[in-house]
């Protein structure tokens, strides 16, 4: 009978320990599932952060490229501005050289018209000078002929 009581007592202790272990197993299994869920969430967050960083890198590269393009445009514009300033200086020097007070198109046309008229007058005078020169040669030839 004592063996039976001892065995029963042992069996009860084993049953209670088994119930305690099952309870711990259930608790540990729940904790394991929660840890796995947290791990998956953490991996998803890491993937999101990695893709966000990739987007930031691409955005930064695009900004750098845009900045470089803008700098190139500014440099080209500066060169064009310098070229235009030089052309304006040359134009101003020509205005001073030809005595033009302003760069108005009408005034420039008037000056060109005057120059054209002066050229025509000069051509007319040149023709007249040549004509007088020929007349003089004829006169001299006539005088020479009469002296002989």
Image (spheres, rainbow, N blue to C red):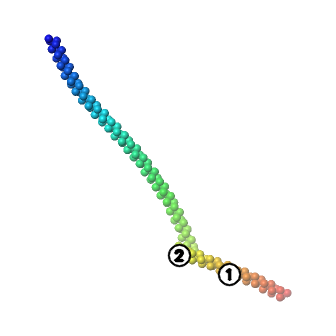
Q: For numbered disc 2, what is the local secondary structure?
A: loop
Mark 2 vs mark 1: give the one in front: 1
Q: Residue furthest bottom?
A: 146
Q: Which mark is residue 34?
A: none
Percent coordinates x, y for residue 64 in the rendering: 44, 50
Q: Write the residue at 44% across / 53% down.
A: 67
Q: Write the residue at 16% across / 13% down.
A: 4
Say which quarter of the image contains residue 140: bottom right
Kindly identify which residue carries mark 1. Answer: 125
User: Tag 1: Cα neighbours inside 10 Å, few (<14), some, or many (≥20)?
Assistant: few
Is residue 86 toward the left or the right of residue 54 in the image? right
**Is residue 97 in view?**
yes
In the image, residue 42 sits, relative to residue 79, either above or below, namely: above
In the image, residue 59 sits, relative to residue 45, either above or below, namely: below
Q: Are marks 2 and 1 in contact (CB under 8 Å)?
A: no
Q: Residue furthest right?
A: 148
Compute the Cα span from label 2 to label 1.
30 Å
Q: Residue furthest left?
A: 1
Q: How many marks?
A: 2
User: Tag 2: Cα neighbours inside 10 Å, few (<14), some, or many (≥20)?
Assistant: few
Percent coordinates x, y for residue 97 in the rendering: 57, 73
Q: Write the residue at 50% across / 58% down.
A: 76
In the image, residue 73 sits, relative to residue 120, either above or below, namely: above
Q: Earlier in the sequence, mark 2 or mark 1?
A: 2
Q: Write the residue at 65% across / 78% down.
A: 120
Q: For numbered disc 1, what is the local secondary structure?
A: helix
Say which quarter of the image contains residue 40: top left
**Is residue 96 in view?**
no
**Which sits in the foreground, 105 or 139?**
105
Percent coordinates x, y for residue 62 in the rendering: 44, 50
Kindly identify which residue carries mark 2. Answer: 101
In the image, residue 75 sits, relative to residue 25, either above or below, namely: below
């Amino acid at each position: 009978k004592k063996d039976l009581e001892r065995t029963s007592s042992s069996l009860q202790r084993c049953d209670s320990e088994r119930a305690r272990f099952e309870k711990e197993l259930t608790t540990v299994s729940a904790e394991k599932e929660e840890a796995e869920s947290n791990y998956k969430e953490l991996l998803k967050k890491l993937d999101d952060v990695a893709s966000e960083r990739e987007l930031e890198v691409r955005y930064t590269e695009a900004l750098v490229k845009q900045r470089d393009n803008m700098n190139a445009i500014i440099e080209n514009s500066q060169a064009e501005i310098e070229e235009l300033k030089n052309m304006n200086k040359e134009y101003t020097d020509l205005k001073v050289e030809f005595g033009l007070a302003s760069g108005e198109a009408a005034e420039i046309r008037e000056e060109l018209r005057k120059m054209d008229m002066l050229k025509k007058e000069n051509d007319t005078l040149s023709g007249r000078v040549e004509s007088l020169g020929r007349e003089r040669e004829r006169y001299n030839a006539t005088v020479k002929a009469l002296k002989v």
